Amino acid sequence: MLTPARNSRELRSTSSNPFYIPRVKTKAGTRAFSVAAPTVWNSLPVSVKSEGNIVSFPRRLKTYLFNAAYPP
């Protein structure tokens, strides 16, 4: 359901592995998985997304979300 974003030229942002976000016409369409999932993934910092280990990814994600909800 997720499509990698394709650029016609090499950009610095390609290292962050962005996903294509389809255009929608309605407010309800923004809540669809095909729109919401790539939006959330693209908004994550590279430090969370670039973790190659499946065990440490949830830990980094949890830390990021906790810090976003309760800033110091």
Image (cartoon, rainbow, N blue to C red):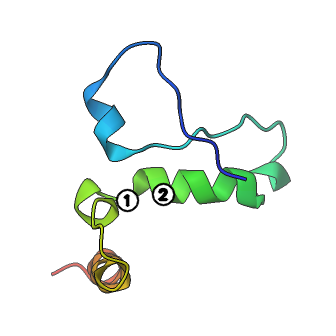
- Which quadrant does the C terminus fall into? bottom left
Single out the residue that lies furthest toward the left.
72
Single out the residue that lies furthest toward the front.
53
Question: Which residue sits at x=38%, y=13%?
Answer: 9
Question: Which residue sits at x=83%, y=55%?
Answer: 28
How many numbered discs?
Answer: 2
Amino acid type, label 2:
Trp
Instruction: Name the element at disc 2.
Output: helix
- Residue 36: where, in percent of width, then height? 65, 57
Q: CB atoms at circles 2 and 1 under 8 Å apart?
A: yes
Single out the residue that lies furthest toward the top.
8
Placement of 8 over or under 65, stated as above or below? above
- Residue 31: where, in percent of width, then height? 75, 60
Label 2: few (<14), some or many (≥20) within 10 Å? some
57 or 21: nearer the viewer: 57
62 or 55: nearer the viewer: 55
Question: Residue tagged by mark 2?
Answer: 41
Res 71 → quadrant: bottom left
Label 1: few (<14), some or many (≥20) within 10 Å? some
Please give the label number shown on residue 44: 1
- Residue 10: where, in percent of width, then height? 33, 19
**In this picture, residue 17 sits left or right of residue 13:** right
Please give the label number shown on residue 2: none
Amino acid type, label 1:
Leu
- Residue 46: where, in percent of width, then height? 27, 55
Placement of 6 over or under 52, stated as above or below? above
**In this picture, residue 40 sits left or right of residue 59:** right
Instruction: Name the element at disc 1.
Output: loop
Spatial CA distance of label 2 from label 1 is: 5 Å
Question: Which residue sits at x=52%, y=26%?
Answer: 6
